[in-house]
Image (tube, rainbow, N blue to C red):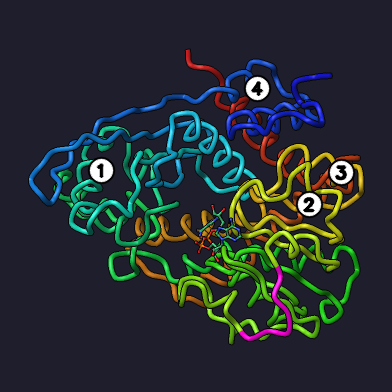
Amino acid sequence: MTTAEPPLEAEEESAVETARRQLERAATHLDVDEGIVERLRHPRDVYRVTIPLERDDGSREMFTGYRAHHDSVRGPYKGGLRYHPGVSEDECVGLSMWMTWKCAVMDLPFGGAKGGVVVDPKDLSDEETERLTRRFAEELRPVIGPMKDIPAPDMGTGPQTMAWFMDAYSMQEGETEPGVVTGKPPVIGGSYGREKAPGRSVGIVTREAINYYDWDPAETTVAVQGFGSVGANAARYLDDIGATIVAVSDVEGAIYDPDGLDTTDVEDHDETPGMVSGYDAPRSLTNDELLELDVDVLIPAAVGNVLTGENAREVEADLIVEGANGPTTSTADRIFEERGIPVLPDILANAGGVTVSYFEWLQDINRRAWPLERVHEELETEMLQAWDAVREEYDARDVTWRDATYIVALSRIAAAHEARGLWP
Ligand code: NAD
């Protein structure tokens, strides 16, 4: 057994282990210099900073922040900043590697980064969050910038966090630098369509997969776990193209209507928390039951590690499209492979977010906003190009969709390393 194949009952992997395993699996299909693969197993740098915060009561508290830079051979580092008590150096490194693959599969001129602060944002007032964010921006200022590393929102952060971050950076640089972060409010250089983009790309990839398998969208049933930003936008997109969304859920439970739910009538998690499971539908289900429904397409779009060795044999969907990051454990992945259930991976399906972040960066550099229609058109083009590249690898080799996606990413990264060479 190679390191690329964990035993079936292996303990679940960390993000770094998953990223390394996917790298090694892809490398077995390509003629890539072992030195390049070895380089990609490691981050280029990880910055650890201490952020002093004055609390509202006048006391001082220290918080730890990280920024991991994985690889920048294709362009500046790009990736989110999360505020969460579980943030760790290892998690940032693993997720920075995922961002390298995600940007490469989308052919964006970026490399991978990830960072965050070990904090529960619910414990901070708005004023404290602002002070923490401004000081974090200042601590990271030497290693970020529009041409170096461009953070974005992630768990526990949002457009307002990015606005404070951008303002702090700009004040210190002496000029307004909207391109230092993406995911800002449009009034200060954010892009229209950014927030809905990950869900929209999940919809586009699902639509292409439905066409690939020669299904009729009007005959296709879909269950979506997690009716939040990603899930609700994916469900509504697929509803619009004629698919029947039979089940959606929030953290409290799922609703089910075999004739199809009206996805515009169900309010999403952001609109009113708890409204999904409280909606008047023919049947209520648990989240576990939703995952095991006999549907054509299952879209896990809530949290990671929901499809596991425990439930993968009970899944009855014919196709899985990953809306969330990492919803399928490696054990479940192998079971789906054995059972012939295709899984379209997160780094392709939800990559609309980083793609519209790229559009935002272009708009900021050019100081010219794009109308929403242009964002939608360009996102469609980028998603189709990525889909075509992955489909070609999938058709040409005896591999899973996930492997095909990583093969596309690694071949682009390796070619860039080959072309640039090693310094000195
Ligand atoms: P969100 O908070 O808007 O929505 C999450 C939804 O999942 C909510 O309906 C919530 O009630 C539900 N949920 C939470 N925990 C659950 C659980 N244990 N079981 C079932 N349902 C649960 O979040 P989001 O932005 O839509 O993100 C969802 C996933 O997509 C995450 O994995 C995130 O990392 C990933 N993602 C988000 C973006 C983005 O820009 N929003 C981009 C790429 C990937």
Q: Amino acid at mark 2?
A: Val
Q: Which residues are magenta?
A: 280-285
Q: Residue at x 28, y 30 (%)?
A: 49
Disc 1 element: helix
Disc 3 element: helix
Q: Residue at x 46, y 57 (%)?
A: 357
- Nearer to me, 109 or 254: 254
Classed neighbour count for the residue bearing mark 3: other residues with Cα under 10 Å, few (<14), some (14–19), many (≥20) = some
Residue located beneath label 3 in the image:
337
Label 4 with label 2: CB-CB less than 8 Å: no
Mark 1 beta carbon near ligand 1 (under 8 Å): no
Q: In the rendered view, would you say 292 is above or below 219?
A: above
Q: Earlier in the sequence, mark 3 or mark 2?
A: 3
| Residue 254, visible in the rendered structure | yes
Left or right: 32, with 278 as reference point: right
Q: Amino acid at mark 3?
A: Glu
Disc 4 element: helix
Alpha carbons under labels 3 and 2: distance apart: 8 Å
Label 2 with label 1: CB-CB less than 8 Å: no
Residue located beneath label 2 in the image:
343
Residue located beneath label 1 in the image:
137
- Nearer to me, 80 or 414: 80
